[in-house]
Structures are given as C-alpha cells and as structure tokens.
Amino acid sequence: MRILLIEDDPQIGDGLNRGLQKLNMAVDWFRDGLQGASALEIAPYDAVVLDLGLPNIDGLEILKQWRSKELDIPVLILTARDAIADRVSGLNHGADDYLCKPFALDEVAARLQALVRRRQGHTSSKLVYGALELDTAAQSATLHGEELSLTAREWTLLQMLVSRPKHIISRAQIEDKLYSWDQEVESNAVEVYIHHLRKKIGNEFIKTRRGLGYQLGEAP
C-alpha cells in the first residue's frame, strides 16, 4: 500500500513516515501543501493522510481541489482542529475519515487499511483464494492453514494480486506500489518477488502475461 503524507510538522511527519513504513507501507512525505497536492496527480496512491494547517495552502483547500477534479482517493484528515464544526466541514468537503491529534500510529494504520478495503469493495479484512487466506489487518497470510513467511514487499505484491484476481497488473504498477520516490528500484526486483511467491505458493499461482504483466492463476 502506497500512502501520500502531507504534514508540515517535522516531528509528527517523521514519526508517521517511519511508523507506516515499518507497517509495510510505502510513504511519500511532503511538508509543503502545494507540492503534496500536485503529487496525487503523478503517482498512484492508495490513500492520503492530510494535515489541515499547512503552509502556502490550507489542507481543506487541497481537498476541495482534488474533489473538484473528481479525484476519489481515500483521504484521512489528521489535524489539531478538533471542533465539531471543523470535523463536519472536512467530511462535507470530501474527507473519508477525520482523526484529531494526538493520535496512535496503530489507529492511523487501521483507519487507512479500512479506507482502502472499502474503496476496493471489500467489507472484511480477510481475502480468500482457494486454500490461501490473507488477513489485511494483521498483514499475514496462510496456505492450507499454515502461516506463510513473507517479506514486506512480497506481502504487498500478494495483496495486490489477490485483491484483484481477474486483473492483469503491469510491472510498472507493481513498482509504483512497492517503492516510494526516494527508494531505488532494482531492474529485476519484480521478477524476483514473483519467483519467491511462486516458490512459496505454487508455480501456477501467478501467470505471466507476456508484454502486459502478471495475473493470478490457479488457486492453491
């Protein structure tokens, strides 16, 4: 899962950036509201964490601009403005959730996961494909009841595939989800992760669609 974080407070931003990355999320952190607002139109994010009190442009104005352009990305407002009127205003202008500072990192992560699940049309944190079961809340996977040992990026790739079993996902789309802008992508990284998942789940589990990308194959 790739997250756009727009937060000008260095301590809060750094804590969220580091914390969400430890929870297997790729994060792009912007301190400037204008730069952060533009980033959404460049990279394929799964959700946004948006502060309201930003320099140069207010977070609520950013949200209005996004919604006027019909950008339907899930947005979690994270702010010190805790008055009911502020919450109502944020939700009425297109926010999907609203959380006041101070906050717990685990709650931020849980709310982001819930927003992304709803956007993908999943009401539960459990995804099942044959004998394979994923728990997106716990970020764990089992095969025939036995837990799979997965790296953070293997897990993210597996979740991408199982969330959309009929879709073909290109290599570029996978790289965009696995890496933030400040991380270097090795030339054969995606192929390596695909190889590892096939080895752990089954050779026919992931199909290669030549020239297009990858798609789920036979259910284990």
Image (cartoon, grey):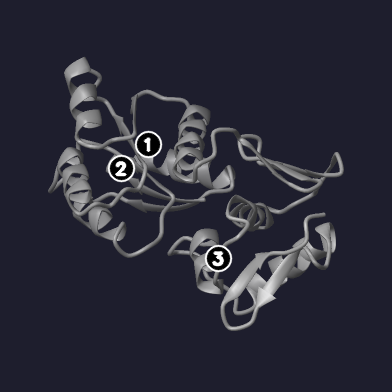
Looking at numbered disc 3 in the image, what kind of residue is underneath it? Ile
Q: Secondary structure at mark 1?
A: helix
Q: Secondary structure at mark 2?
A: loop
At horizontal 51% and vertical 59% (from top left) the residue drawn is 177
Find disc 3 in the rendering and name its residue: 174
Compare marks 1 and 2 and give the one earlier in the sequence. 2
At horizontal 12% and vertical 48% (from top left) the residue drawn is 56
Looking at numbered disc 1 in the image, what kind of residue is underneath it? Ile
| Mark 1 closeness class: few <14, some 14–19, many ≥20 residues within 10 Å | few
At horizontal 53% and vertical 47% (from top left) the residue drawn is 21
In front of the other: label 3 or label 2?
3
In front of the other: label 1 or label 2?
2
Q: Tell how many labels.
A: 3
Q: Secondary structure at mark 3?
A: helix
Q: Position of residue 147 (x, y in %)?
A: 82, 42
Q: Nearer the viewer, residue 68 or 130?
A: 130
Left or right placement of residue 27 versus residue 156 in this view:
left
Q: Position of residue 112 (x, y in %)?
A: 46, 37
Q: Position of residue 59 (x, y in %)?
A: 20, 41
Q: Is residue 164 above or below residue 172?
A: above
Evaluate if marks 1 and 2 touch, with contact meaning CB atoms under 8 Å apart. yes
Compare marks 1 and 3 and give the one earlier in the sequence. 1
Find disc 1 in the rendering and name its residue: 12
Q: Nearer the viewer, residue 58 or 84?
A: 84
Looking at numbered disc 2 in the image, what kind of residue is underneath it? Glu
Q: Which mark is residue 33?
A: none
Find disc 2 in the rendering and name its residue: 7
Compare marks 3 and 2 and give the one earlier in the sequence. 2
| Mark 2 closeness class: few <14, some 14–19, many ≥20 residues within 10 Å | many
Instruction: Name which quarter of the figure residue 96 lies in.
Output: top left
